[in-house]
Image (tube, rainbow, N blue to C red):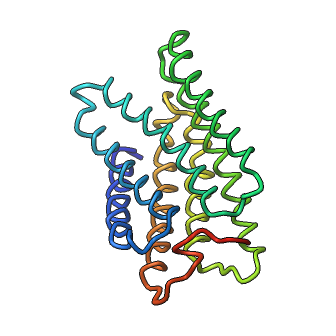
Amino acid sequence: MDHFYTRMLATCIEVLVALFGVMIFKKAGLQFRLLIFLLLYGAATDIFGWTFYKLNRTYVLIAVDIYTLAEALLMVFIIQSIGLFNNLKNIFKLIYLLLFVCYVGAYFVMPLISDDGAYRGPYSFGYLSTVAVLAAWASLKWIEGAGNKLNSPVFALLAGVFIYTFCSVFIDSFIGTTTGDAVWWIHDAANITAYLIFAYCFYLIKKSTTVEKSVINLPEKV
């Protein structure tokens, strides 16, 4: 399957979902606003790549590499900002540090050893695995919380992040290889599924008629 068309479809859906998110931006809490920003940033990066890939591949790869670090850090922060891991602040500080240090090693040191681009795969595998574990753990903690509902925007956000990262982790480990190009459509399918879940998340926020503390503000205690 030609991954160009599946990636184009995924990006189009991402744009639509992001625009839907903009509509509920003022009503949404911090974690949802960050998600909306990340969707817009991701779509802009993809569109930039389509536009300039043939003109200047180097600039496109730089843009994608910068987005990779932004996505890694923001996804972890989105999960942390929900407020389910307030007693693990030092652990999250360590995660941020490791994500940055490993990024420097993968994107600045490894290219000096090999310039085939395969160094991008291991970093993607690492941060996607980390976020997937955190999202799954947060989902379980949310379900166990008294009064928390499965049809809440918070749970939809966590589910979307988990699907996005878990289903992409193995595909992204092949970035820069011919195998990655051959199976990339699976990555796009996972992304589309996650985007639709995010759209449902924004729908739940939009339809709410009362200001719920779990949506607008960070929960005090779960």
Residue pictured at 28% horizontal, 45% vertical: 47
Marker count (numbered): 0
Lateral position of residue 20 relative to residue 126, left or right: left
| Vertical relation: 126 (above or below) 23 | above
Residue 68 x/y as whole percent: 48, 38
Identify whether 180 is placed above or below 216: above
Image location (x, y in percent) of residue 125: 62, 38
Q: Residue sitting at 51 percent across and 35 percent down? A: 180
Residue shown at 62% from the left, 40% from the top: 127
Q: Is residue 205 above or below residue 63?
A: below
View extreme (bottom): residue: 209
The C terminus - image quarter:
bottom right
Q: Is residue 174 left or right of residue 49?
A: right
The residue lying furthest to the top in this view is 113
Q: Name the side, left or right, on which 66 lies relative to 125.
A: left
Is residue 154 or residue 28 the one in the foreground? 28
Q: Is residue 83 or residue 6 the one in the foreground?
A: 83
Examine the image and state in which quarter residue 163 appears.
bottom right
Which residue is nearer to you in this view: 182 or 67? Answer: 67
Residue sitting farthest toward the front: 220
Left or right of 209 on screen, residue 16: left
Task: Depth check: give the residue in front, 112 or 188.
Answer: 112
Establish if 182 lies above or below 101: below
Can you give x and y, in whole percent of width and height, for residue 218 in the image? 60, 68
- Give coordinates of residue 139: x percent, y percent: 69, 65
